């Protein structure tokens, strides 16, 4: 039986949110899931928010995840994760990268980057997994693979075998970058 899973990925333009969602969709398709995906690019090329909603199940009718409906929120940046906390189920899992990317109001001095984000999420989410994905990706050979590290952390919580993920990575990542991304995925998968 295909257990429905609703995943919300959120980050800032350039962090690889879209690639991570494509890898997940490829793996889910191989496992026989019906998939609906919705992507929102808020001036993504200029550091704006990128939100991807991925719904998996036997039959999915809408790509949109309601508030308190996400089983997993995968946050590539802390403030973006905080912003989407209302979408996480009370017993859901928040996987959050420790990275801070100040939004424009912070950069121009009109606002301050909030403090205590991680602590708030840890006290609110059913499960909170905090990851320094940049450091892990750098150890694997490429800091740009932080998105795949985070995907690996999430993959452990989904019912897909390792070989399914390997094929999804190979299908979505250029051959010259595949080995470093496989290492990044494995490091994320083994994280806690």
Image (tube, helix red, strand yellow):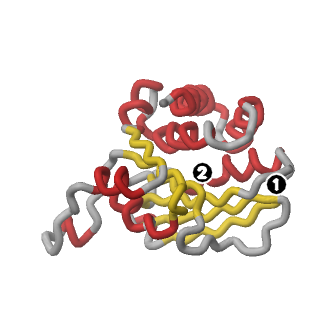
Query: How far across and down, in percent of the image, does residue 35 sit?
Result: 77, 61
Question: Pointer 2: residues within 10 angstroms few (<14), some, or many (20+)?
Answer: some
Question: Does residue 100 show up?
Answer: no
Query: How far across and down, in percent of the image, does residue 105 sit?
Result: 22, 72
In this view of the protein, which residue sits in the foreground, 92 or 186?
92
* Left or right: residue 90 compared with residue 54: left
Question: Does residue 136 show up?
Answer: yes
Mark 2 lies on a secondary structure that is helix
State the image quarter where residue 31 is shown: top right
* Left or right: residue 177 compared with residue 140: right
State the image quarter where residue 129 is shown: top left
| Comparing labels 2 and 1, the label whose residue is closer to the camera | 1
Give the number of the disc on residue 19. 2
In the displayed structure, 70 sits above or below 25; it is below
Give the number of the disc on residue 62. none
Query: How far across and down, in percent of the image, does residue 116 sit?
Result: 23, 55
Count of marks placed on residues = 2
At 13% across and 70% down in the image, what residue appears? 109
In the displayed structure, 119 sits above or below 10; it is above
Query: How far across and down, in percent of the image, does residue 120 sit?
Result: 31, 57
Circle 1 is placed at which residue position? 33
* Left or right: residue 156 compared with residue 102: right
Mark 1 lies on a secondary structure that is loop
At 50% across and 44% down in the image, what residue appears? 147
Residue at the limit of the structure toward the left, as seen here: 109
In the displayed structure, 115 sits above or below 69; it is above
| Sooner in the amino-acid sequence: mark 2 or mark 1 | 2
At 71% across and 36% down in the image, what residue appears? 165
């Amino acid at each position: 039986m295909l257990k429905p899973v609703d995943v919300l990925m959120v980050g800032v333009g350039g962090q690889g949110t879209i690639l991570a969602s494509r890898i997940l969709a490829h793996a889910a398709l191989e496992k026989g899931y019906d998939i609906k995906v919705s992507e929102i690019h808020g001036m993504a090329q200029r550091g704006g928010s990128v939100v991807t909603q991925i719904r998996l199940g036997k039959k999915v009718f809408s790509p949109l995840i309601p508030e308190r409906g996400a089983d997993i929120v995968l946050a590539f940046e802390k403030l973006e994760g905080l912003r989407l906390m209302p979408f996480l189920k009370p017993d859901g899992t928040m996987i959050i990268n420790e990275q801070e990317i100040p939004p424009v109001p912070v950069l121009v001095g009109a606002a301050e980057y909030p403090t205590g984000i991680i602590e708030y999420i840890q006290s609110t989410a059913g499960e909170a997994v905090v990851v320094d994905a940049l450091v892990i990706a750098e150890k694997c050979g490429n800091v740009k693979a932080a998105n795949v590290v985070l995907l690996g952390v999430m993959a452990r919580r989904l019912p897909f075998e390792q070989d399914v993920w390997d094929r999804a990575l190979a299908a979505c990542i250029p051959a010259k970058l595949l080995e470093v991304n496989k290492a990044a995925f494995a490091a994320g998968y083994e994280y806690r």
